[in-house]
Amino acid sequence: MAITVGVIGTGAIGADHARRITQTLTGAEVIALTDVNLEQAETVKNTLKLNATVYADGHELIANSGVDAVLVTSWGATHEEYVLAAIKAGKYVFCEKPLATTAQGCQNIVDAEMAAGKRLVQVGFMRPYDSGYKMLKQAIDSGEIGTPLMIHAAHRNQSVGKNYNTPMAIHDTLIHELDVFRWLLDDEYVSTQVVFPRKTTFAHDQLADPQIVLLETKKGVRIDVEVFVNCQYGYDIQCAVVGEQGIANLPEPQAITMRKNAQLGNALLTDWKDRFIDSYDVELQDFFDGISANKLTGPSSWNGLAAAIASDACVTAQQSGQIEKINLPERPELYR
Ligand code: NAP
């Protein structure tokens, strides 16, 4: 029997996840939808020809006994209340990042899950499911480049809207790196500093762009990440791990190389949806497979909390200009 799914928030990623559940993945079916804009939920229902009910709000959807699992894809600020409600109802819940907008909010979710006594939450950190990152991790774990010493990374977007401000470069953008480096290195952060190069003229008043985030880990690995969200030329994710005996680079997305008009080159992606499309499929299938096996193994609430603690420290560092400590509590047994 298919796992019945309710989707809260049918904007860009909510609609895309509903599409992949319906057209690409196996073992799950969207039977419930909601959005603050109910017309938007109706549009997704009709476009995908879903046999689904549109609910007036997320709590009503969660309370419906016919819904086995909940997808929280609404605005970040609403995630915590819906995830807590789903846990309270004993339902599995896939929550897009951020798990909550504050570390305390993530801690509340971890506490609720521990009280429930089992993992019910998977966070939408999809990079560990990306084939390129998997190859990079394999290269590190195999010892081919020796002990990792440094990471040089970049997260570049072509442009962002007027509502995107300086802290969002951390909470919304860097958060993926904050999660994936912990996974790549099997390590935790101890401190961070943020420095600001000359500002691009393409950034509006509320945004300092680009930024360079410096991180230090417990094992002493130093990481620099350029976050540049108005880079103009495309959507570009770079990651080079420097080890004692070599360097492992994140592979570039596949693209046809052309010789044309006296030039040799290939097109770059411009949309994050295209860059990680395969990993979104794999992460969500893993969520449903985990439910079927009664054991979730994907990114947990603990990963959400660890990323949030690091992210809060980076925002403090943006404001202070100082090196800020990152203090992660002891990892509970449930998340080992
Ligand atoms: P979006 O297009 O603005 O979609 C969010 C949708 O949720 C909108 O339709 C919004 O309504 C609706 N909504 C807001 N509050 C709600 C509530 N209380 N109950 C029900 N629906 C509500 O944003 P998005 O790009 O899809 O992002 C959604 C979340 O996914 C964000 O947390 C974002 O960080 C995350 N995300 C993750 C990735 C990833 O790579 N993993 C990629 C993209 C987004 P309106 O009609 O009023 O806008």
Image: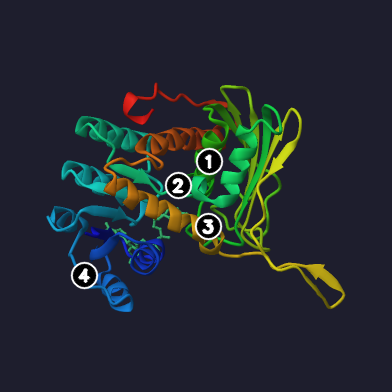
The answer to whether any part of residue 77 appears in the image is no
- Marks 3 and 2 in Cβ contact (< 8 Å): no
Q: Which secondary structure lies at badge 2?
A: loop
CB of mark 3 near ligand 1 (< 8 Å): yes
What residue appears at the point 50 percent right and 61 percent down from the top-left corner? Answer: 277
Q: Quadrant of the N terminus?
A: bottom left
Is 87 in front, or is 166? Answer: 87
| Mark 2 vs 1: CB contact within 8 A | yes
Which three-letter amino acid code belongs to the residue tagged 1?
A: Val
Q: Is residue 186 above or below residue 251?
A: above
The mark nearer the N terminus, 1 or 4, is: 4
**Other-residue count near label 2 (Cα within 10 Å), few / some / many at <14 / 14–19 / ≥20:** many
Which residue in the structure is indicated by mark 2? 125
Picture residue at 57% right of the left edge, 30% below the top: 192
First in sequence: mark 2 vs mark 4: 4
Is 69 situated left or right of 265 in this image?
left
Q: Which residue is labeled 1 in the image?
A: 180
Residue 189, x across and y down, in percent: 53, 28
Q: CA distance from mark 1 to mark 4?
A: 35 Å
Q: Residues within 10 Å of mark 1 (few under 14, many from 20)?
A: many
| Residue receiving disc 3 | 276
Q: Which residue is mark 4?
A: 52
> Residue 25's spot in the image, x, y percent?
37, 62
Q: Is residue 197 above or below residue 40?
A: above
If the picture is divided into quarters, which one holds ligand 1?
Answer: bottom left
- The local secondary structure at tag 1 comes to helix
Mark 2 vs ligand 1: CB under 8 Å? yes
What residue occupies the far right of the structure in this picture?
Answer: 262
Of helix, strand and loop, which one carries label 4? Answer: loop
